[in-house]
Amino acid sequence: MRHTDAIVRDQIYPTFLPAVFGHEGAGVVVAVGSAVTSVKPDDKVVLGFNSCGQCLKCLGGKPAYCEKFYDRNFACTRDAGHTTLFTRATKEQAEAIIDTLDDVFYDADAGFLAYPATPPEASGVSVLVVAAGTSDLPQAKEALHTASYLGRSTSLIVDFGVAGIHRLLSYEEELRAAGVLIVAAGMDGALPGVVAGLVSAPVVALPTSVGYGAGAGGIAPLLTMLNACAPGVGVVNIDNGYGAGHLAAQIAAR
Ligand SMILES: [Zn+2]
C-alpha cells in the first residue's frame, strides 16, 4: 500500500468509498464486463491517474500536479459545465454527499441530489410533470429534477388523479402547452392514458408502487399504461423517476 492509498483509506482525502485503490501500473486485461467497450481481454494497458490535459501544469508536462487532480481522482466530480446527479439516496448517503461537496441541491422527499446546485440554462421544449396523487410525489419530483438538471424547463402539477378529473381539466391550457409530459400514477394507473387523450405531445408514463394489495407493487398501473388506448404513451419502469425524467429531457431537446 502506498501513501496515497493510506490517506484515502483514512479519509484524509475525503473520497467516496468503496473505491478501487491503486497507483500507476501496467498489465494485461483478463476480463471485462458487458458494458465495457474501450478495452478487451488480452489488451496491454497502463493504469494511471486522471488529469485535465489543459491546465498550465498539464501543458508543462506535469500531469501529476494537474490543478484538477483532486477533483478528477478523488472527489468524483467533473469539470465545470457538467452536472452530477445522485438518485435514490438514503438520508445517510445524502448527508455524506452534502458533507463532501459544497453547493449541492437536495430534495429529501425524492432522495435526489445534484451537484452543482444550479441547473444548466434551459433549452428545448418544456417538460410538464403531472402527479396523480401526493403519494406519487417522490417519483414525480425525481423525474422533475432529472429533467431540470438535464437542461429543460420544467413544471409540476400535483393531485390531479382520475378520482378528481375535473381538477385536471382546469389545467387544460397548461397540459396543451407542454412540449413533453411525464405522468406519474399508482393505483389503477389510468391518468397517463387520460392525459394522452387530451394533448398532442408525447406522454412518458411513470407507474408508481403506490396502491393496495392487488396493485402488486406497481404491476397493475404498469400494465394499464402499457395497454393505454390513447397513442403517444411511452412507459418506464415502476418508480423509475430518473428514467422518466431522462427520456422526457431527451425528447424535449428539440
Ligand atoms: Zn491539468
Image: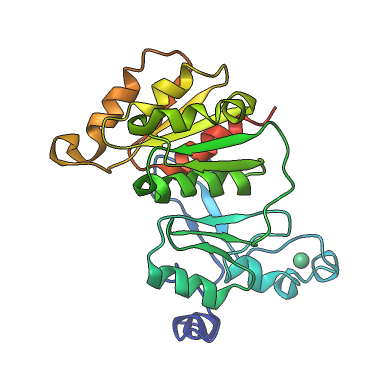
Observer able to see residue 72 = yes
* Residue 70 percent coordinates (x, y): 65, 73
* Residue 250 percent coordinates (x, y): 60, 32
Q: Is residue 115 above or below residue 23?
A: above
Give residue 225's quadrant in the image: top left
Give residue 177's quadrant in the image: top right
Q: Give the camera-side residue of 201 and 9.
A: 201
Observer able to see residue 36 = no
* Picture residue at 74% right of the left edge, 71% below the top: 66
Q: Is residue 229 above or below residue 242?
A: above
- The number of callouts visible is 0
* Picture residue at 45% right of the left edge, 21% below the top: 233
Q: Is residue 55 above or below residue 191?
A: below
* Residue 199 percent coordinates (x, y): 54, 19
Figure quadrant, ligand 1: bottom right
* Residue 11 percent coordinates (x, y): 49, 84
